[in-house]
Image (tube, helix red, strand yellow):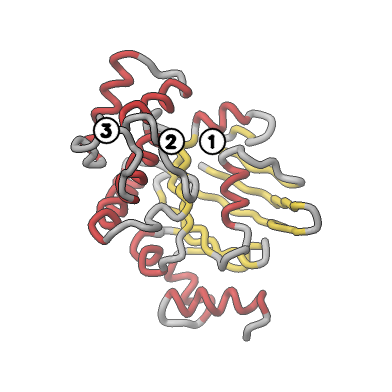
Amino acid sequence: MIRVSNVAKSFGKVKAVSNVSFEAPDGAITGLLGPNGAGKSTTLRILYTVLRPDQGSASVDGHDVVSASLAARSATGALPHGSGPYPRLTARENVRYYGQLNGMSGAALERRIDELADMLEMNDFLERRTKGFSQGQRTKVALARALVHSPRNVILDEPTNGLDVMATRALRELIRKLRDAGHCVLFSSHVMQEVAALCDEIVIIGRGEVVASGSPDQLREQTGEANLEDAFVKAIGSVEGLE
């Protein structure tokens, strides 16, 4: 489970996140939504320990992301937005390196890489250097790196960005399988169709604060809108002064 409590983060005079609180439970897919600049990526970076919050707290499976950052990191598999593989390494070497960073080695690590290659349909390019890979291939390698140590919690920042239709469908199915296996999945996306199809819970951020949260049905009920996109626009409008 992921917990965020009253988190704030500024960069100089720019307040990226001012007061964000939410929970992402195990066995569920939680979507983090908001317009560009709302604070989504900053919040996710705090969760996978790249940034420290200025105030508030966040934890992964009870491990504080600041005071117990190594434990929190071990419990998390992260796919940052724009994350790409090391181009001079093969796909296997990329995934192996991340496994070694998480204390894995030997035959057990190689079996896990082979398992992920089957799961993500990577066998055709597993032994190739990643320089020149398509966007879909790069995303699969990055996702395999995130999952190699079998983390309980998975954080995905716009994971389908740049993927074709077939790769997107395959990734959505994998996300559902992670949820069904009891994992906590937290992801951000700008694709409302994707959010509607996948999310059990949704957290909407506007101007660095949570402006609405709940299941898709609850958000539609709260805003009085029939579809999720209109509900999102209305929730954001309430803080952006668009109503």
The location of residue 12, given as percent across then percent down, is 79, 53
Q: How far apart, in angstroms, are the residues tagged by discs 3 and 1?
A: 36 Å
Query: Which quadrant of the structure image shows residue 217?
Result: bottom left
Identity of the residue furthest to the top in this view: 106
Q: Which residue is mark 1?
A: 61
Q: Which residue is mark 3?
A: 128
Q: Nearer the viewer, mark 3 or mark 1?
A: 3
The location of residue 125, given as percent across then percent down, is 23, 37
Give 112 or 209, whichever is nearer the viewer: 112
Identity of the residue furthest to the left in this view: 124
Q: Disc number at residue 91?
A: none
Query: Which quadrant of the structure image shows residue 105?
Result: top left
Quadrant showing the C terminus: bottom right
Q: Nearer the viewer, mark 2 or mark 3?
A: 3
Relative to 63, does residue 227 appear above or below in the rendering?
A: below
Give 178 or 36, whichever is nearer the viewer: 36
- Residue at image coords 26%, 61%: 165
Residue type indicated by callout 2: Arg
Circle 1 — which element? Answer: loop
Q: In terms of sequence position, does the residue under pointer 3 or pointer 1 come before the other?
A: 1
Residue type indicated by callout 3: Arg
- Residue at image coords 43%, 74%: 228
Callout 2: 10 Å neighbours few (<14), some, many (20+)? many
Give 91 or 208, whichever is nearer the viewer: 91
Q: Which residue is mark 2?
A: 152
Q: In terms of sequence position, does the residue under pointer 2 or pointer 3 come before the other?
A: 3
- Is 7 left or right of 119, judged from the image as shown? right
- Asked whether the beta carbons under mark 2 and mark 1 sit within 8 Å of each other, the answer is yes
- Residue at image coords 34%, 49%: 175
